Image: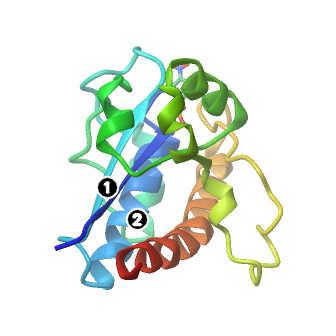
Amino acid sequence: MKTVSVCFICLGNICRSPTAEGVMRHFVEEAQLTDRILIDSAGTGDWHIDEAPDERAQHAARQRGYELGMLRGRQLKSADFERFDLLVAMDERNITALRQVCPPAQRDKIHLLMEFVPETDDRWHGAREVVDPYFGGKEGFEQVLDQCEAACRGLIAELRARLLA
Ligand code: 4NP
């Protein structure tokens, strides 16, 4: 059976990429595609290895029905470029960090999350980055969730198309 795999990438792997992972897992479960779409996340930095997501990210996600408590921080490793079909980054800084270590043959796998926002989404279509909420207030975590929900709707459509291709 054909599968597709995606790894969400941010800096610390405790705020944005676990949020994207939690939202995407929920959407994939709703679509009954858990055995076809494989999801993970990682950070480019090494500060939060084995830590649970930031409490503020967990709380904001839980309010919308997404559970992040079982996730643990990990750092990107070179095998991830082989293992995943898509590496989906939150911001341009993540993209730069990914490109620095990505084997040339795998470069097409690297994308910004916001590239997947559907054109019909008036609020988020055209946005490029998911801004780091770590040093800000709780409204930043709400915005991360809004952006992850918008982009993951488009991402699941893209992955469905790949499964059928
Ligand atoms: P994230 O947020 O990249 O969305 O997980 C951050 C978390 C921690 C740090 C930076 C960003 N930090 O500097 O520790």
Q: Can you tell which mark lies on residue 39?
A: 1
Labels 2 & 1 near each other (Cβ < 8 A): yes
Colouring? rainbow
Picture coordinates of residue 91 (x, y %)? 67, 39
Query: In front of the other: label 2 or label 1?
Result: 1
Kindly state the secondary structure of the residue where label 2 is placed: helix
Instruction: State the residue at coordinates (73%, 46%).
Output: 129
Picture coordinates of residue 163 (x, y %)? 35, 76
Indicate the quadrant containing the N terminus: top left, top right, bottom left or bottom right. bottom left
Q: Which residue is mark 2?
A: 24
> Position of 78 compared to 156: left or right?
left
The answer to whether residue 62 shows anywhere in this view is no
Kindly state the secondary structure of the residue where label 1 is placed: strand
Quadrant of the image occupied by residue 80: top left
Task: Give the tally of numbered discs.
Answer: 2
Instruction: State the residue at coordinates (26%, 35%).
Output: 72
**Residue closest to the eye, 16 or 4:** 4
> Position of 121 compared to 30: left or right?
right
Picture coordinates of residue 144 (x, y %)? 61, 53
Instruction: State the residue at coordinates (79%, 69%).
Output: 125
Disc 1 residue crowd, few under 14, some 14–19, many 20+, Cα 10 Å: some
The residue carrying mark 1 has its beta carbon less than 8 Å from ligand 1: no
Disc 2 residue crowd, few under 14, some 14–19, many 20+, Cα 10 Å: many
**Residue closest to the eye, 74 or 6:** 6
Q: At label 1, which amino acid type do we have?
A: Ile
Q: Can you tell which mark lies on residue 162?
A: none
Up/down of 126 relative to 6, above or below: below
Instruction: State the residue at coordinates (27%, 77%).
Output: 29
Up/down of 66 relative to 139, above or below: below
